Amino acid sequence: MQLTTLDWIIIIGFLVIIVGVGISYTRSASKNLESFFLGGRNMPWLLAGVSMVATTFAADTPLAVAEIVSKNGIAGNWLWWNFLAGGMLTTFFFARLWQRSGVLTEVEFIEVRYAGKPAQFLRGFKAVYLGLLMNAVVIAWVNVALQSLLVVFFGLSASEALFYTGCTMVLAAVYSSFSGLIGVAVTDAIQFCVAMIGCIALAYFVTQSAEVGGIANMKETILAQDKDLLNFLPSFDTSSNVGTTLGLGMVGFLAHAGFIWWSCWYPGAEPGGGGYIAQRMMSTRSDKDAVYATLFFQIAHYCIRPWAWIIVGLAAVVLYPDIVAGDEKLGYVYAMRDYLPAGWRGLLLVAFLAAYMSTISTQLNWGAGYLVNDVYKRFIARNESDKHYVWASKISTILLMIVGLWVTTFLDSISDAWKFVMQAGAGLGLVLILRWYWWRINAWSEIAATATPFVVTPFMYWYQVDDAVALIGTTLITTVVWLVVTFLTKPTPFSTLAPFWKKVHQFELDVNQPNQIFNRQFGYLGACWGFGLLMTYSILFFTGKLILQEYATAGILGATALVGFLGLQYFMNKAGLIKDEK
């Protein structure tokens, strides 16, 4: 694919602007670690929320959604739509707590919540495990996705695609190492806007092409092939050409909808919050800002982003009916290649570079925070100056980039990386949720929940257990193990637990009244969770029905979304989450 001069001007101009904007925040990010990794804890909720959305919009995301739609229809997106339940739980039950905790990173929280040598070990281990090892895997699969796009779009060899991916990664590492989180967040906002404009433009050009003939004609063609492709809700009709929902069957769907959202650790969807989502919550100006940022993230993540990708995925079914099984994700790239006019082609490529850079810059900044704050500062160099630690953070950012590129050379399958990450965290999620509310959980509980999947998983692979069954089985075994360990070991000392409890929950802990946490406000937060789910899912489906020109159903869903909004507003006010008017 040849790019025109206009395309190249757009691409180079974008890269110059992004690097320039990022570097412009060097001074404000260089004061201390709090400035570098949390933006001085003064980030507006909208900027923090947009940054969350941009980070989860990686180069692989549109391709993955298009592949899901091509293979399993619109309903196949329940593979990730189910995570909304966990996201809303984080919004109302954990966002304020993370902001109040006062920690710099998620793993620093471990020594605030737990005590003694087990807490020290757990903090150091998770800092290396998440910040270096798991982070490198995530960086690698994002790199592989961009490589795949470059190979198809430009006809490059794998080695050439790796070279250009590495160059783009260097640019992201440069501005993130200078600007810290605040620069990353501002560039995230720019990148997200560019990425969405490009994706919406592609959906428009593809559906208006002569071959597709508009939304109505596209629907008619798809319905002639398989009506289930346009279903929004799960179906387990095995006679369908699409197959069972998600291609997983009943057990697989139950694993995703019933277990994964609360039980499995997964980047960007950690039960109870965590990772870069927690980082953004902790960077906000107040606990209410943390709630608003996370609520915006849920709505934008599930309602604003996906339909442009879904429509292109449906159009690809019409345009490329003979695409090779296993290469369905390339339908999106073929559509880019074949249906974008000059200028727009460059803009959409910029959109993918933007999505890639926003994810990579966050992964580098977040991972460096773990390595510096929770390993280097905590265990190696305890009494150095702020300037020293900021420089260590910049160096760690570059080193993480190098490790990520190295791991990329060994990774061939994105789906295999997803499965590994999910399986490695199966069963850990419930501990991450309950440690905020159940005083009895201690460091050994979390150690057991972290370690058990690594003992169980080899047996699951050895006996070739189905992926869905393996996830459910590992979750149940891990849960039993950590519960047994919890009751066989001593709880966190009251001297550690009481100040933590007062700081995040803002009332005194009384272990003789274990149900005190289930007060009236807890009920209000539960109602917020329920109405938040109703509102967001209704907006998601309303948008889809509107695009697909099913106006009667869209009207009903719009009314349902309004009910969800009003209920959410009422209970947020009851729970004290509505901002005071200034």
Image: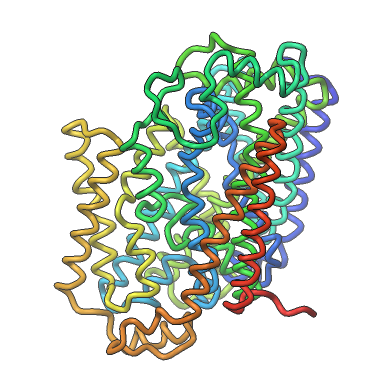
Q: Position of residue 29 (x, y in %)?
A: 67, 65
Residue lying at the far right in this picture: please name it.
6
Task: Count the labels in the image.
Answer: 0
Q: Is residue 94 visible?
A: no
* Foreground pick, 470 / 497: 470
Q: Position of residue 202 (x, y in %)?
A: 73, 27
Residue lying at the far left in this picture: please name it.
488
User: Which color scheme is applied?
Assistant: rainbow
Dividing the picture into quadrants, the one containing residue 31 is bottom right
In the image, is residue 384 above or below residue 395? Answer: below
Q: Residue at x 62, y 75 (%)?
A: 577
In the image, is residue 304 above or below residue 563? Answer: above
Image quadrant holding the C terminus, namely: bottom right
* Foreground pick, 427 / 517: 517
* Foreground pick, 59 / 244: 244
Image quadrant holding the N terminus, namely: top right
Relative to 421, is 338 on the left or the right? Answer: right
Q: Residue at x 61, y 49 (%)?
A: 538
Q: Residue at x 53, y 57 (%)?
A: 276
Q: Position of residue 255 (x, y in %)?
A: 34, 43
Q: Is residue 377 visible?
A: yes
Q: Residue at x 75, y 48 (%)?
A: 190
Q: Position of residue 129 (x, y in %)?
A: 36, 54
Relative to 102, is 209 on the left or the right? Answer: right
